[in-house]
Amino acid sequence: MPFAQIYMLEGRTEAQKRAVIEKVTQALTEAVGAPKENVRVWIQDVPKENWGIAGVSAKDLGR
């Protein structure tokens, strides 16, 4: 059972998350031949102040 864990900065819409789940499921089905019913996708929204880029939080960078 393929399991995809995706970390993204918070702020994506529900529609965008649905699209990610659909596309990742499709990619795993095509790449490894797993039935889509067996694919699991977990999206973890990360607060911008908890994501660092080059020593600075994404919030402070205005991301």
Image (spheres, rainbow, N blue to C red):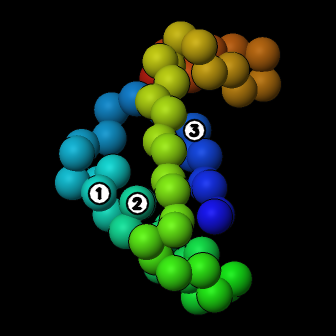
Contact, CB < 8 Å: mark 2 with mark 3?
Answer: no
Which corner quadrant holds the N terminus?
A: bottom right
Pick out the residue farthest to the right: 54
Q: Residue at x 37, y 68 (%)?
A: 22
**Looking at the image, is 55 positioned above or below residue 21?**
above
The label shown at residue 21 is 2
Q: Secondary structure at mark 2?
A: helix
Residue at 69% across / 15% down in the picture? 56
The residue lying at 62 percent from left, 21 percent from top is 51
Can you identify the residue that label 1 sits on?
Answer: 18
**Residue 62 visible (yes or no):** yes
Mark 3: amino acid = Tyr
Dot 1 amino acid type: Arg
Residue 11 x %, y %? 33, 32
Q: Quadrant of residue 7?
A: top right
| Circle 3 SS class | strand
Q: Tell me residue 28's x, y (percent).
A: 60, 75
Distance of mark 3 from mark 1, alpha carbons?
Answer: 14 Å
Q: Nearer the viewer, residue 9 or 17?
A: 17
